[in-house]
Image: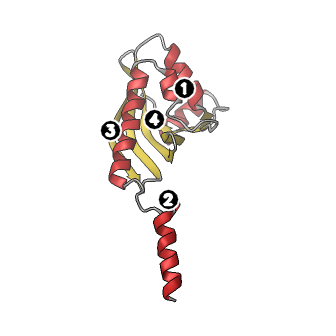
Amino acid sequence: MRISSLVLAAAFALAPEFSFAAEQPSQAKADIEQVVDTFKAAIIRHDGQGLKELFLPDHGNWLSVIHEELYRKVVERNPEAQRINPSTYASFADFVTHAKEPVEERFYNVRIETNGTIGIVYFNFDFLEGGKIENRGDETWQLIKTDKGWKIAAMLYSSQGA
C-alpha cells in the first residue's frame, strides 16, 4: 500500500496535467473584465476585426430575443415578425466596422461568474448610434478559457427598443 501511495504522489508531482496551479477565479474574473473592456472599446473604435478576435472561431451562437412588450408592438405592424433572431458575431463586427455614425454599447450592473475555465457575464446595456439610444436590454455571454485567452462562445441579448 505504501509503494502505491508513493507512485501516485510521484505521478501527480511529475505530470503537469495534474497540476493544481490552474488560474484562480479572481484572476480569471479580472481577465474576463478585460474582455468586456476590450469589447466596448472595439465598438467605439469601429474595430470589427478586434471584435471578431474576442469570439471563439467558427461558433456563431448569437441570438437576439425581442422583449415581450416590444414584440407585441412589432407583431401589430408585421404579423410575420420573429421574436427570436439568430445572427453572428461576424455580422455585428461588420456593422460596427462600416457604421457611418459613432456607435457605443454601455454596460450596467455587470456580473461575472467563473471557475477559471468557463465564465458567464450578465449585464444591462444601452446601444447607441450617433449618441442616441437605439436599443437597450439585458445581455449574457458564455466564455471559455482557451490557449489564446478568454473567448466568447455564445451571446444572448434581449431587445427592448429605445
Left or right of 80? Residue 71 is: left
Alpha-carbon span between mark 1 and mark 2? 39 Å
Relative vertical location of residue 48 with respect to residue 112 in this rendering, above or below: above
User: Which numbered disc flags the more N-terminal residue, 3 or 4?
Assistant: 3
Relative vertical location of residue 147 with respect to residue 100 in this rendering, above or below: below
Left or right of 95? Residue 121 is: left
Secondary structure beneath dot 1 equals helix
User: Which numbered disc flags the more N-terminal residue, 4 or 2?
Assistant: 2
Q: Residues within 10 Å of mark 4 (few under 14, many from 20)?
A: some
Q: Which residue is mark 1?
A: 92
| Contact check, label 4 and label 2, Cβ < 8 Å | no
| Contact check, label 2 and label 3, Cβ < 8 Å | no
Q: Which residue is mark 2?
A: 16
Q: Residue at x 49, y 28 (%)?
A: 51
Q: Which residue is mark 4?
A: 160
Viewer-nearest of discs 4 and 1? 1
Residue 108 has which mark?
Answer: 3
Examine the rendering and report whether any part of residue 141 can be seen.
yes
Q: Amino acid at mark 1?
A: Phe
Residue 30 image offset from top left, x and y in percent: 33, 44
Residue 42 image offset from top left, x and y in percent: 42, 24
Viewer-nearest of discs 4 and 2? 2
| Contact check, label 1 and label 2, Cβ < 8 Å | no
Alpha-carbon span between mark 4 and mark 2? 48 Å
